[in-house]
């Protein structure tokens, strides 16, 4: 804890005040050891009806370089919800600096005990679920929608669809995971892939659009 206080300047009055406000007044902590740590240059814009539930500790803006002015942003709309953690190991969740997380009105985002690298963008207007033990590499984009009120004038068109990423999934750098996709447990998405269809468990997919290039794989970090 002392290392956290020093690294993220939690001794500074402003940082200390934010830490106290969010952890003891604003969010719901499900365990005594679950804390939300907001690094310097982290911006939170949450509607008063939005809810954050913590089952594991989260560092938002992890590993920001000392002289970097790149902001980490979390924005939450009316009646939106975020659930952090819940895995068996209750590990610390790291969300890298420069990341942007948007949870729209009535939308639900769940992130298990996983690692989200820097400059990752998650745009959730319906529901996005990320399991435990995942690695989301830097520059990745995950979105369950086509953006705002944009829509195709076609019968049966739906702007937003559930995105579900299973447990122990590795998503490579600068990949995109688009609406309506389910990625199975143990799968790997190669760098710069565009995932538009479901990925079976323990498969490696690559390309734009992503296709299965290897089956029955195993990986570890």
Image (cartoon, rainbow, N blue to C red):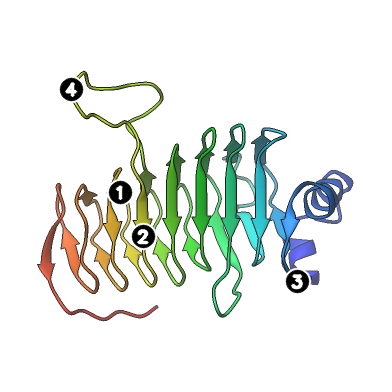
Residue 63 visible, this orientation: no
The image shows residue 61 at horizontal and vertical percentages of 61, 51
In this rendering, the answer to whether 134 lies above or below 19 is below
Instruction: Tell me how far mark 3 sits from mark 4, CA to CA.
Output: 49 Å
Image coordinates of residue 195 in percent, x first then y, are 23, 50
Label disc, if present, on residue 33 of the rendered structure: 3
- Residue 174's place in the image compared with 170, above or below, is above
Which of the two labelled residues, at mark 1 and mark 3, occupies the earlier sequence position? 3
Give the Cα distance between marks 4 and 1.
23 Å
Asked if 84 appears above or below 52 in the picture, the reply is below
> Label 1 crowding class (10 Å Cα cut-off): few <14, some 14-19, many 20+?
many
Q: Nearer the viewer, residue 98 or 53?
A: 53
Q: Which mark is residue 165?
A: 2
- Image quarter (top left, top right, bottom left or bottom right) of the C terminus: bottom left
| Residue 213 locus on image (x, y percent) | 10, 66
- Residue position for label 1: 177
């Amino acid at each position: 804890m002392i290392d956290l206080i020093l690294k993220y300047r939690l001794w500074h009055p402003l940082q200390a005040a934010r830490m106290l406000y969010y952890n003891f007044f604003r969010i719901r902590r499900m365990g005594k050891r679950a804390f939300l740590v907001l690094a310097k240059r982290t911006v939170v814009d949450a509607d008063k009806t939005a809810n954050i539930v913590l089952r594991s500790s989260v560092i938002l803006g992890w590993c920001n370089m000392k002289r970097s002015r790149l902001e980490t942003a979390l924005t939450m709309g009316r009646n939106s919800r975020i659930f952090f953690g819940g895995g068996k190991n209750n590990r610390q969740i790291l969300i890298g600096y420069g990341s942007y997380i948007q949870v729209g009105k009535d939308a639900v985002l769940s992130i298990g005990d996983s690692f989200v690298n820097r400059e990752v963008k998650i745009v959730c207007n319906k529901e996005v679920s990320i399991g435990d033990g995942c690695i989301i590499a830097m520059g990745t984009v995950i979105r369950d929608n086509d953006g705002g009120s944009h829509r195709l004038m076609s019968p049966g068109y739906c702007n937003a669809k559930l995105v579900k990423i299973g447990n122990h999934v590795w998503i490579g750098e600068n990949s995109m995971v688009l609406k309506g996709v389910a990625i199975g447990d143990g799968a790997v998405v190669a760098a710069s892939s565009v995932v538009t269809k479901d990925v079976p468990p323990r498969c490696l997919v690559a390309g734009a659009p992503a296709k299965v290039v290897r089956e029955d794989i195993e990986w570890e970090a």
